[in-house]
Amino acid sequence: MHVRVNAAISADGKLSSRRREQIAISGDDDFDRVDRLRAESDAVMVGVGTILADDPSLTIDSADRRENRREKGLAENPARVVADSHIRTPPNATVLDDSAETYLLVSEAAPSDFVAQMEEQDATVIATGENRADLAGAFDELQSHGIERLFVEGGGEIIFSLFEEGLVDRLSVFVGSVVIGGRDAPTLSDGDGFVEDFPQLDLERVERVDSGVVLEYDVPA
Ligand SMILES: NC(=O)C1=CN([C@@H]2O[C@H](COP(=O)(O)OP(=O)(O)OC[C@H]3O[C@@H](n4cnc5c(N)ncnc54)[C@H](OP(=O)(O)O)[C@@H]3O)[C@@H](O)[C@H]2O)C=CC1
Ligand SMILES: Nc1nc(O)c(N)c(N[C@@H]2O[C@H](COP(=O)(O)O)[C@@H](O)[C@H]2O)n1
């Protein structure tokens, strides 16, 4: 499986403010770049923190791109994947609507009545890991469902875990020309953080987009 991570950060590295509300850091051109990357993927993934904060759709905006996928025999939207160990995704979350397939990556500790409720809503539940979803194991299972190109849009907790487990192949970051600040505001990579063996990146491309810049990195194995 090929895993690409993308996020938009402020010039001081934040994904959002301390209120953890959705903030449009990207401008129109960057949102369009992200829409193209979604269209080129088999699935779009976020952590449940992003579901609770943003209630995203994770679908493709452009009708042309959806049509293009249909012509290739693909579903008009990529699948949606939510890392959600104990099922905190609300039953009325937009990712559970019928515009795309949805996978929930849960742990074996996820309450069985919540699992049943998600399955009733046509979500596919993949259980790995004792108390927290085991991402590597869950990705193997996603591959068996035909997901080869996974596009991860955040947030900071899930991005850290993916780097920690060596699961990231590519990273693109839009750096907006704004300062958000706040010691409790989420950053691109949160979790416990690294103290040694910091993942190294190869900077491949820098492009001015909107009033910011897109940095495109390869992540060597
Ligand atoms: N600017 C941007 O591009 C973006 C901004 N955001 C912003 O980021 C914030 C949300 O980020 P954040 O709170 O970090 O949430 P995340 O979306 O990273 O979700 C984190 C949650 O995912 C669950 N999870 C399941 N398995 C794992 C695992 N193996 N490793 C880590 N987490 C796992 C955990 O909950 P549990 O233990 O219950 O499973 C964890 O709390 C919001 O403010 C949102 O607006 C989000 C995306 C993009
Ligand atoms: N690329 C990008 N730029 C920003 O400024 C953002 N705030 C985000 N957020 C991500 O996009 C998701 C919203 O998706 P929908 O438009 O609802 O499909 C949001 O949940 C974050 O993952 N991204």
Image: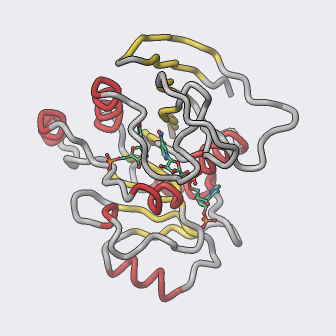
Q: Is residue 148 left or right of residue 32?
A: right
In-image side of 121 versus 108 (left or right): left
Which residue does the image show at 49% across and 11% down from the upper left? 206
Q: How many marks?
A: 0
Instruction: Residue at 70% x, 71% y: name it.
Output: 131
**Could you tell me residue 201's position as x and y percent?**
66, 21
Residue drawn 47% across the image and 80% down it: 115
| Figure quadrant of the C terminus | top right
| Front residue of this view, candidates 7 and 185 | 185
- Estimate the x, y position of residue 192 in percent, counting from the top left: 77, 49
Q: In this picture, is 4 found above or below 46?
A: above
Q: How is the image coloured?
A: secondary structure
Q: Quadrant of residue 193?
A: top right
209 with respect to 185 (left or right): left
Q: Residue at x 36, y 70 (%)?
A: 123
Depth check, front residue: 43 or 48: 48
Could you tell whether 166 is left or right of 158 in the image? right
Q: Is residue 92 above or below residue 221?
A: below
Ligand 1 lies in quarter: bottom right
**Residue 77, above or below 125:** above
What is the x, y in percent for residue 23?
A: 42, 43
Residue 171, position as x, y percentages in the image: 54, 28
Q: Nearer the viewer, residue 221 or 194?
A: 194
Which residue is most to the bottom? Answer: 113
